[in-house]
Image (cartoon, rainbow, N blue to C red):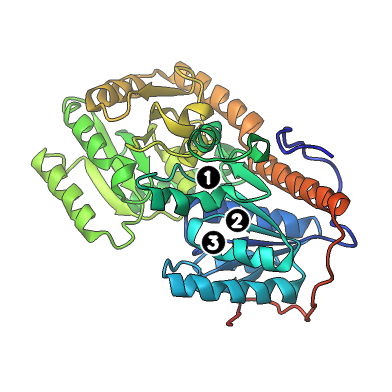
């Protein structure tokens, strides 16, 4: 039997569980824009395409439509709740889902629903897998124990080498159960050749951007950890430079933080140069519009997918030198790194990126595209994850004889499964 320390090696052919095609239930709190949610949708779509049965349980959200189009079953449950009573009741709800659909693997991607789904998997004899999507704050012993549910799976997927080190350093887990499968970029969507000039022009008009001004882009939700204030402090030091800065992303109801940013922009007299346009429904066009993309996160990103997305679009990156970001870039060839939290160093890196001549930018773009396509594609991520599912099911078939489960006719579409 192979151990889980071996490198994920996508094998050919469809995923196959003993006695039939596999049924995999992924569990996330909500289906809103985010790394865990995006990965869940991508994996579910890939599994359905290969002939398996893909289910996602969540509290719902805008990404439900993508699942429906891909033929994935969505089960709506109150999985975003951290209320202990709701979490306890979710165990029975998930047991019902597992039994109704004959689930083989439960794959949890967030802590609160992981507690419920781990208990449900134990009750039904399912294999349990987790993906560790972030370097959760450790704090006191209670918090550490709460986080530790994410290392309780048969396999523990780390979405970067940084996260794998974090797990090994902070949790009691057999290193053989840790598997590094990096996040992947949708190269069909983030392809500069497929983004028309019309799309870029429409976006520039919507944002009322003047022609010929160099544009700095910071993508990401308006949360303090993304480093918006740090970038504003850096831009204050570039008053003599010709630029506009777009901090693109939803505030998710954080009106107080948005107001804080607006006041800081006004205090530094940057109101005509720094804008908060809200969410963007065409990020490939936004990247193509940008002259430089910034990742200024003050807390290490587990991966930081905007860095790979920007490189896939051939755009120079300026990023804080920590977390999973460092694994994605070729320093001084596709990105310029700065010490985390250092506004002066960030300003210097921005000045360097904005000063690139056209020939250097073309060379950087070509290197960045090749690098991302070779190492960080969505197809690679999906193939490695499905290969891991295969491995787990084969190992389980060798070690045990599965107990028969109570089978009920599977429901289709989005449904509520209440206990």
The quarter of the image holding the N terminus is top right
Q: Which residue is mark 3?
A: 115
Mark 1–mark 2 CB contact (< 8 Å): no
Q: Which residue is mark 1?
A: 196
Provide the secondary structure element on which disc 3 rests. helix
Q: Residue at x 47, y 44 (%)?
A: 134
Provide the secondary structure element on which disc 1 rests. loop
Indicate which disc, 3 or 2, sits on the residue closer to the N terminus: 2
Indicate which disc, 1 or 2, sits on the residue closer to the N terminus: 2
Provide the secondary structure element on which disc 2 rests. helix
* C-alpha distance separating marks 1 and 2: 29 Å
Left-right relation of 10 to 143: right
Q: Position of residue 102 (x, y in %)?
A: 77, 70
Q: Residue at x 70, y 77 (%)?
A: 412
Query: Can residue 282 be seen at all in this image of the molecule?
Result: no
Mark 3–mark 1 CB contact (< 8 Å): no
Query: Can residue 328 be seen at all in this image of the molecule?
Result: yes
* C-alpha distance separating marks 3 and 1: 45 Å
Q: Which residue is mark 2?
A: 40
> Of 405 and 224, which appears nearest the observer?
405
Q: Position of residue 352 (x, y in %)?
A: 33, 19
Q: Position of residue 250 (x, y in %)?
A: 35, 56
Left-right relation of 396 to 212: right
Q: Quadrant of residue 21?
A: bottom right
* C-alpha distance separating marks 3 and 2: 18 Å
* Mark in the foreground, 1 or 2: 2
Indicate which disc, 3 or 1, sits on the residue closer to the N terminus: 3
> Of 193 and 268, which appears nearest the observer?
268
> Of 343 and 111, which appears nearest the observer?
111
Left-right relation of 341 to 291: left
């Amino acid at each position: 039997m192979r151990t889980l320390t071996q490198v994920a090696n996508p094998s050919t052919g469809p995923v196959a569980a003993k006695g039939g095609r596999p049924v995999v239930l992924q569990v996330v709190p909500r289906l809103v824009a985010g790394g865990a949610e995006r990965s869940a949708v991508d994996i579910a779509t890939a599994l359905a395409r290969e002939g398996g049965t893909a289910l996602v349980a969540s509290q719902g959200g805008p990404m439900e439509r993508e699942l429906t189009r891909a033929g994935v079953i969505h089960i709506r449950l109150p999985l975003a709740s951290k209320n202990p009573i709701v979490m306890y009741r979710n165990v029975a709800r998930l047991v019902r889902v597992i039994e109704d659909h004959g689930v083989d693997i439960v794959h949890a991607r967030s802590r609160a629903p992981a507690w419920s789904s781990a208990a449900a998997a134990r009750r039904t004899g399912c294999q349990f897998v987790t993906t560790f999507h972030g370097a959760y704050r450790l704090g006191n012993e209670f918090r550490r124990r709460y986080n530790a549910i994410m290392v309780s799976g048969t396999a523990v997927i780390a979405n970067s080498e940084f996260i794998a080190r974090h797990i090994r350093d902070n949790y009691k887990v057999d290193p053989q159960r840790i598997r590094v499968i990096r996040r992947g970029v949708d190269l069909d969507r983030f392809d500069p050749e497929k983004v028309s000039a019309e799309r870029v022009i429409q976006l520039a008009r919507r944002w009322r951007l003047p022609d010929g001004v160099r544009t700095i882009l910071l993508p990401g939700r308006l949360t303090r950890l993304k480093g918006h204030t740090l970038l504003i402090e850096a831009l204050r030091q570039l008053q003599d430079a010709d630029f506009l800065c777009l901090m693109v992303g939803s505030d998710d109801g954080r009106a107080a933080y948005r107001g804080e940013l607006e006041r800081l922009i006004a205090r530094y007299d940057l109101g005509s140069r720094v804008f908060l346009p809200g969410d963007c429904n065409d990020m490939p066009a936004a990247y193509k519009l940008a002259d430089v993309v910034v990742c200024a996160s003050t807390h290490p990103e587990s991966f930081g997918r905007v860095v790979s997305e920007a490189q896939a679009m051939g755009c120079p990156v300026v990023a804080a030198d920590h977390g999973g970001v460092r694994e994605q870039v070729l320093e001084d060839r596709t990105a310029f790194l700065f010490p985390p939290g250092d506004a002066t160093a960030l300003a210097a890196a921005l000045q360097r990126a904005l000063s690139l001549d056209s020939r250097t930018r073309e060379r950087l773009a070509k290197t960045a595209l090749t690098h991302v396509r070779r190492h960080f594609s969505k197809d690679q991520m999906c193939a490695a994850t499905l290969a891991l599912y295969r491995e787990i099911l084969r190992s389980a078939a060798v070690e045990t004889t599965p107990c028969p489960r109570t089978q009920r006719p599977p429901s289709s579409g989005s449904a509520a499964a209440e206990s």
